[in-house]
């Protein structure tokens, strides 16, 4: 064993940096917190490459005197604590004096600052922990910290960085937390020269909640407040109709600091017990204000976790406040239908009929609509509510539909089987007479069997068509023609819908944002692992955009990525068409059958069997004759 040695300062700093600086988002958090502590009324955050290339935070706070710049970047140097007791009454976000030193250890950091008393500013550069000279520079009052090439000297850490989009997702989350905690500060966020957020100062967080999580959610929030002794609890919780599959939409702010606390999360879950389905988590943005000596914030390097002196009491206060509020609130008043793509939401007969008509319309008007925007069902269907499920899924469409005459046909169809055997000569006269009993004209007559196949007579014999495959193919062709002419219309959602994804899903979606845009799917980054669905292909107005996104995602994530853009586009077209098409099991009206059959030539094309399965089987007359031993 080698002897025990004191570690060199730079190694100490690197170890500390490991705790404080996990990724670019940590830098954003620390720099923004410093700006808030400095009393800034405006903070501008700009990042490049998800923050891995550059993070710059500019504030108009109190600034740092030129002679203190070297101390600011030295470890364990702070102006926020003076004596040991201060540690137990921390009223600032920072106090450990570690952040700047840690960040400077693993990046190229430039610190520029000027106080109101000083005529000019001063600048200090630190490269991998090596500080240069303080030099004068011109700058406005306040502080600018620019961090470049994070982890350039710690390749192991650099390897842990994820894609640009993932890292930016985390940056967005850090920004969101501070923006919500400090609504009185004007904050902006830019990524690669694109403005992501510009949020003017406001009194409370509600306006920001709307910007971050959607206006619909914000407007449905329930205000709660209570005070117990010196502890004040206030904020917003969502109506039980809004919930999440994870607890990341539970924000707790303690004296201006965003914290995570299992006990509080648990209390929140308890308050909603019986109001949410299992596996769903409430949404909440709650603020706790209490004298700083009632809480120890020095238990976690990034201060995300804290220790309350009386956490049991806090637990009860939160639970009682929410329970009390729910008891006196008519929770049904706020229910909005179909907020999360509930397929059964807001469905009625009229709508079902309308949707059915649309299917017929587009199938008939397909040629006219191929040329570009403005044709076919795109218009008639535009504006159909998002959120309602696919009209073609069993719940939305199948139910409430009148059973068709097909049941009768079914029986009649079977009867001739026996008859055929007895009077074989008659079968050659033509197809079974019963088929013409439909209201559909001769060219399109067909029989739907088992709610999944269409059996039709052709000049050569009999064709059995897979109804889903045919519809999928029709939709695919339409989409492809529109994509080819650059005319996929996007139907914008009135209220963009936030979709929570896993980090890798979010990254994948954002990576292919442009491609999805070509398909009419408008996706916006939203911070964290949430994306906004802002628009979807207008011609598919009947499908839930969120479901469509999930379908597309599955395609993007499954297996090896298609090598070229064309292939990928093709894959996605198939996914979209498949999702939007009628399913096996959907009973069709004669009109729908006719509309589908008008394009049956599409499934005759042997080169385009969707998924490689045959979409149609052809029995020639010769084949039938042979099988019936007639030839
Ligand atoms: P801490 O915030 O824990 O004190 P930091 O390493 O984050 O430690 O910052 C060190 C010191 O540098 C702070 O105590 C503060 O005096 C000064 N400082 C850092 N950022 C700013 C800023 N944006 N404006 C004014 N002073 C700052
Ligand atoms: Mg700090």
Image (cartoon, rainbow, N blue to C red):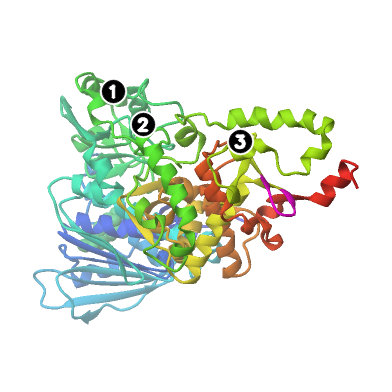
Quadrant position of residue 228: top left
**Which stretch appears magenta?**
456-462
3D distance between C-alphas at marks 3 and 2: 48 Å
Q: Residues within 10 Å of mark 1 (few under 14, many from 20)?
A: many
- In the image, is residue 458 part of the stretch drawn in magenta? yes
Task: Name the quadrant where ligand 2 sits.
Answer: bottom left
Give the labeled residue for mark 1: 319
Residue at 64% from the left image edge and 30% from the top image edge: 410
Give the labeled residue for mark 2: 265
Give the labeled residue for mark 3: 451
Q: Position of residue 490 (x, y in %)?
A: 38, 60
Q: Is residue 391 left or right of residue 290?
A: right
3D distance between C-alphas at marks 1 and 3: 52 Å
Query: Who is closer to the viewer here, 617 or 417?
Result: 417
Q: Is residue 615 placed above or below 121 in the rendered structure?
A: above
3D distance between C-alphas at marks 2 and 1: 10 Å
- In the image, is residue 284 part of the stretch drawn in magenta? no
Q: Is residue 13 visible?
A: no
* Disc 1 versus disc 3: nearer the observer: 3
Say the numbered circle drawn on residue 84: none
Residue at 22% from the left image edge and 59% from the top image edge: 35
* Disc 3 versus disc 2: nearer the observer: 3
Q: Position of residue 352 (x, y in %)?
A: 40, 37
Q: How many numbered markers are drawn?
A: 3
- Circle nearer the N terminus (2, 1): 2
């Amino acid at each position: 064993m080698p002897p025990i040695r004191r570690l060199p300062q730079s190694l100490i700093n690197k170890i500390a940096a490991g705790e404080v600086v996990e990724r670019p988002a940590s830098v954003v958090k620390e720099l923004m917190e410093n700006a808030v502590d400095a009393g800034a009324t405006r903070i501008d955050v700009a990042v490049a490459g998800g923050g891995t290339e550059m993070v710059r935070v500019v504030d108009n706070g109190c600034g740092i005197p030129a002679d203190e710049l070297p101390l600011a970047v030295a470890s364990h140097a702070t102006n926020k604590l003076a004596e040991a007791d201060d540690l137990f009454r921390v009223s600032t976000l920072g106090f450990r004096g570690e952040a700047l030193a840690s960040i400077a250890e693993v990046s190229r950091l430039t610190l520029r600052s000027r106080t109101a008393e000083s005529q000019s500013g001063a600048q200090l550069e630190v490269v991998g922990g090596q500080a240069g000279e303080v030099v004068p520079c011109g700058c406005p009052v306040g502080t600018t910290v620019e961090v470049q090439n994070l982890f350039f000297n710690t390749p192991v850490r650099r390897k842990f960085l994820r894609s640009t989009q993932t890292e930016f997702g985390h940056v967005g989350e850090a920004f969101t937390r501070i923006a919500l905690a400090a609504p009185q500060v004007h904050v902006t966020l830019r990524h690669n020269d694109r403005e992501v957020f510009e949020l003017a100062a406001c009194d409370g967080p509600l306006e920001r909640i709307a910007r971050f999580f959607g206006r619909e959610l914000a407007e449905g929030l329930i205000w709660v407040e209570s005070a117990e002794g010196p502890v004040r609890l206030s904020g917003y919780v969502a109506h039980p109709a809004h919930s999440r599959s994870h607890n990341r939409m539970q924000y707790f702010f303690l004296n201006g600091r965003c914290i995570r606390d299992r006990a509080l999360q648990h209390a929140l879950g308890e308050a909603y017990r019986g109001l949410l389905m299992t596996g769903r988590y409430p949404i909440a943005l709650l603020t706790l204000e209490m004298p700083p000596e009632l809480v120890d914030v020095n238990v976690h390097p990034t201060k995300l976790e804290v220790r309350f002196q009386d956490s049991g009491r806090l637990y009860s206060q939160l639970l009682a406040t929410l329970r009390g509020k729910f008891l006196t609130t008519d929770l049904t008043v706020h229910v909005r239908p179909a907020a999360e793509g509930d397929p059964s939401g807001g469905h009625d007969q009229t709508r079902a009929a309308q949707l059915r008509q649309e299917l017929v319309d587009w199938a008939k008007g397909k040629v006219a609509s191929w040329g570009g925007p403005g044709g076919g069902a795109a218009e008639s269907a535009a504006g159909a509510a998002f959120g309602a499920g696919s009209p073609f899924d069993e719940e939305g469409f199948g139910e409430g539909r009148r059973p068709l005459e097909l049941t009768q046909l079914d029986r009649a169809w079977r009867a001739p089987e026996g008859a055929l055997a007895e009077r074989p000569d008659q079968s050659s006269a033509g197809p079974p007479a019963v088929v013409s009993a439909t209201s559909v004209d001769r060219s399109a007559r067909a029989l739907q069997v088992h709610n999944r196949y269409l059996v039709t007579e052709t000049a050569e014999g009999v064709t059995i068509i897979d109804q889903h495959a045919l519809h999928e193919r029709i939709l695919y062709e339409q989409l492809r023609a529109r994509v080819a002419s650059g005319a996929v219309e996007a139907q914008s959602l009135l209220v963009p819908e936030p979709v929570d994804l896993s980090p890798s899903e979010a990254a994948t979606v954002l990576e292919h944002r442009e491609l999805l845009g070509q398909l009419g799917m408008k996706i916006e980054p939203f911070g964290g692992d949430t994306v906004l669905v802002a628009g979807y292909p207008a011609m598919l107005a009947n499908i839930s955009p969120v479901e469509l996104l999930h379908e597309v995602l599955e395609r993007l994530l499954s297996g090896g990525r298609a090598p070229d853009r064309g292939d990928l586009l093709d894959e996605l077209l198939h996914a979209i068409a498949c999702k939007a098409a009628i399913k096996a099991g959907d009973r069709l009206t004669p009109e729908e059958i006719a509309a589908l059959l008008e394009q049956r030539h599409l499934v005759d094309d042997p080169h385009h069997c969707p998924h490689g399965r045959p979409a149609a089987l052809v029995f020639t007359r010769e084949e039938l004759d042979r099988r019936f031993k007639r030839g």
